[in-house]
Image (spheres, rainbow, N blue to C red):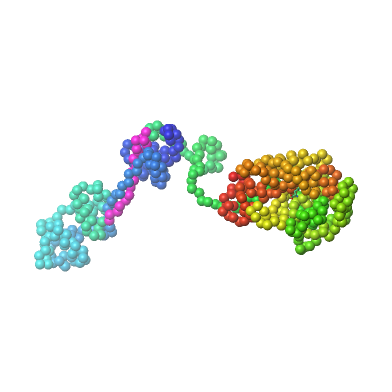
Amino acid sequence: MDTDRIIDQLHIYEKKVLKAFEDSDRPLKPEEIAESQEMDIKSVMSAVGALESRGFVRVIKDVQEYVSLTDDGRVYAEEGLPERRLIEVLAGEGELDVSELAERAGLDRKESGIGIGWLMRKGWAKIDDGRVSPVQEGTPGRGADEELLQILLRGPVRPDELDDRLRAAYRDLAGRKGIIDIRKVKSHTIELTPEGRRLLERGVEIVEEATQLTHEHLKTGKWRELHYRGYNVDAEYPMVYPGKIHPLRRIINEIRSIFLALGFTESRGPVVESAFWNFDCLFQPQDHAAREMQDTFYVKNPPFAQLPTDDLVGRVQSVHEDGGSTGSEGWQYEWDVDVARQSVLRTHTTCVSARFLTENRPPLKMFSVGRVFRRETITYKHLPEFHQVEGIVAGEDVNFRNLLGILREFYRKLGFRVRFRPAYFPYTYLSTECEIYLPDKKSWIELGGAGMFRPEVLEPLGVETPVAAFGLGIERLAMIRLDIRDIRQLYQSDLGWLRKLPVTGDLQL
Ligand SMILES: N[C@@H](Cc1ccccc1)C(=O)O
């Protein structure tokens, strides 16, 4: 990498550490760098670590011994070693009995014992038959050990900085228990490598980096000149699992926003519905297979639902029986109002559209999203309960092509390609099934039905314009979007899966 780029990439602390070597050829201590660059030691050390890993500095680790006085040692340094105190008494008295000597010197038995031992070793006195007498006139001169005690009284010293004489004295004192303490201190010295020197010679410019934008910066306009510390996107971070909207609900919201953006009004209807709204008013004959118990959930409580006005019920009846005034023959059977009264869990959301048409006059665009229920065995691709998005567009010049255009636009907004195949529903003509393309599988899957409501549906409801209608499944769409193979996953609290989904935004991962 070229040097300029390396310099640019250096953190400001790393630049500062390099700068510390600008006027110095010798290795530096972290403390020195901290002082000259006005940094704290921790920042110096972390910058040194970064520079070292890139080969710009070398860290020399060193263990230093420091010698200092213990509390007892301090007393000896101030008042004299026991042998000094003994010899001073002897110098005045000449010769004394051991215990008398101790007493006169103000030493306890133990200390005087040690002192007498050292008197002998240092050759200052001799002992004869329990009596101690000095070897020479006057008091002997101060020894190296006593000199070292005086030095230590001023502060700790490093043994390797002592001259030979004092170092020997240090060893003596170290051998006498309890006078000095030896402490090991690890120290670092930082040395610039030739690569580091070369980098430094290219000129390292230090621009202070702001880590915080203050009120003051904004007020004075200083924010314009500040250089901001970059975010470290590689920094470690704790995993958090914030609450989020369930992915199925997110797709539903997305679908709602598409239809709202297309100018549709949102509506809804009951989940427990009468067979009348779910089937009859949609010109579905009362012996139709879809109405069988094995396909539809019939509700025990309440077993019957309220029907709309007799007028409407009557018109639906005549359309079923003979086509009423529609010109159709109807289904040619005796329509039973009690069958229409039965309550069911709605099997599709098309009943919401039928209800809406009795209460609103065209032109109109309506959509609704809701749960529907069918007696399905639960498998990886079937659930007895799922969601549909239903819609109608009603107006004087609404036609089948408009319907295809709306569906194409809807799926395009969701990111899918759609195609249409002919289909049959009792309530629409023309009818179609929409399929969307799965590029991964190179195949098409069926997602819903659509068509133009038949006159047999519109006439009893009192609607005089064409009505385009569609009803599309949502779960399958979600499965494709979320790339899941088992529809049940949408209804399980599988935290592992849910946690990994992004919190917001497009679910197309
Ligand atoms: N109700 C149909 C879909 C559909 C709605 C509207 C018109 C035509 C078809 C279904 O559940 O599959």
Residue 285 image point, x, y percent: 82, 53
- The answer to whether residue 207 of the structure is visible from this angle is yes
Q: Quadrant of residue 2?
A: top left
Q: Quadrant of residue 303?
A: bottom right
Q: Which residues are magenta?
A: 181-198
Q: Which residue is located at x 23 percent, y 58 percent?
A: 76
Residue 99 image point, x, y percent: 16, 67
- Tell me: 238 left or right of 349: left
Q: Magenta includes 319?
A: no
Q: Residue furthest right?
A: 325
Q: Which residue is located at x 80 percent, y 40 percent?
A: 398
Residue 319 image point, x, y percent: 86, 51
Quarter placement of the C terminus: top right
In terms of depth relative to the viewer, which is nearer, 302 or 339? Answer: 339
- Tell me: 238 left or right of 63: right
In terms of depth relative to the viewer, which is nearer, 117 or 139? Answer: 117
Q: Report the predominant secondary structure element of the magenta stretch.
A: strand
Q: Is residue 105 above or below residue 379?
A: below
- Tell me: 274 left or right of 493: right
- Tell me: 356 left or right of 178: right
